[in-house]
Image: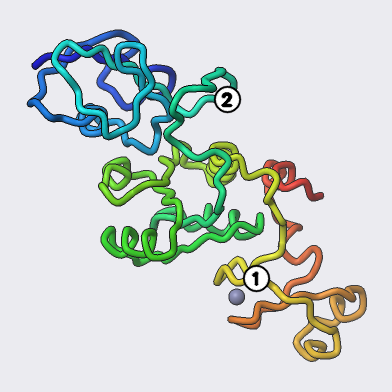
Amino acid sequence: MIVYLRFYEELNDFLPRARRKKEFTREIPETTSVKDLIEGCGVPHTEVDLILVNGESVDFSRKVRDGDRVSVYPVFESLDISGAIRLQQRPLRNPRLLADVNLGKLARYLRMAGLDTAYRNDATDPELIEQMQREDRALLTRDRRLLMHAAVEKGYLVRSDQPTEQLEEVVHRFDLYSVLDPFSRCIHCNHKLNQVEKDAIRERLLPLTERYVDEFAQCPHCHKVYWSGSHRRRLDRKVKELLGVD
Ligand SMILES: [Zn+2]
């Protein structure tokens, strides 16, 4: 059977040039779901927020019928689609993230922003999927095929290769502005920091820090000590702006 498809806005980035920004046809077997139809065109379902079939809003499980006209939209900022079925959570209700192996710098920035971000530089794809499910995390990756895995419910395809821009993308996409809590989390192991008395860590401080700094926090897991300025100083201006710190 034949269906008619059109993708909107940035979803066109996933398509070959000849299919961008216009209607095209696709021949598919019967009982294909809308989700399989869309991913068969190279667009991960995590990027899709609204699907109209013949003008009606549907969810991913809707079976496609011969002659259907399918319009596919990304996560919108401003379009009023109240009444329609939105397919992505935004803002993320439970902002727990999982970064793919090549997003180490992004993971550090997200932790710096106070966001719970799991990361390992040696995780295999099956291990990532397993951890994502077990800990109910949203998967961040630059690998669109990974997002097409059937188990992925929440995820985001990171576009930029610049960590500062990646941070901005993720915060924006999941609308995390209100839950940012800069410098509350260990950037090495993701644990929440505890306040610690200066006397308890005094012998570990450099002389100038010992003299001029009075408030400290410590990671309960790796015991690294943090203080105001210890990782602010070298932060990119863009990250500071986003986190609302100077
Ligand atoms: Zn730590």
Amino acid identity at mark 1 = Lys
Q: Relative to residue 143, is residue 154 drawn left or right?
A: right
Q: Which one is in front, 77 or 187?
A: 77
State the image quarter where residue 193 is shown: bottom right
Residue on which disc 2 sits: 77
- Mark 1 / mark 2, whichever is N-terminal: 2
| Element type where label 2 sits in the image | loop
One can see residue 18 in this view = no
Within 10 Å of disc 2 (Cα), the crowding (few <14, some 14-19, many 20+) is few
Residue placed at 42% from the left, 34% from the top? 87
Q: Which mark is residue 42?
A: none
Residue 74, percent across and down?
A: 43, 26
Image quadrant in which the N terminus is located: top left
Residue 232, percent across and down?
A: 74, 58
Residue 101, percent across and down?
A: 39, 58
Q: Relative to residue 185, is residue 11 drawn left or right?
A: left
Residue on which disc 1 sits: 192
Q: Relative to 208, does residue 60 appear above or below in the rendering?
A: above
- Give the alpha-carbon distance from disc 1 to disc 2, as whole Å: 31 Å
Q: Are marks 1 and 2 in contact (CB under 8 Å)?
A: no
Amino acid identity at mark 2 = Glu
Q: Relative to residue 146, is residue 223 drawn left or right?
A: right
One can see residue 28 in this view = yes
Q: Which one is in front, 153 or 131?
A: 153
State the image quarter where residue 6 is shown: top left
Residue 155, percent across and down?
A: 42, 45
Residue placed at 42% from the left, 46% from the top? 154
Residue placed at 45% from the left, 37% from the top? 88
Q: Relative to residue 78, is residue 240 drawn left or right?
A: right
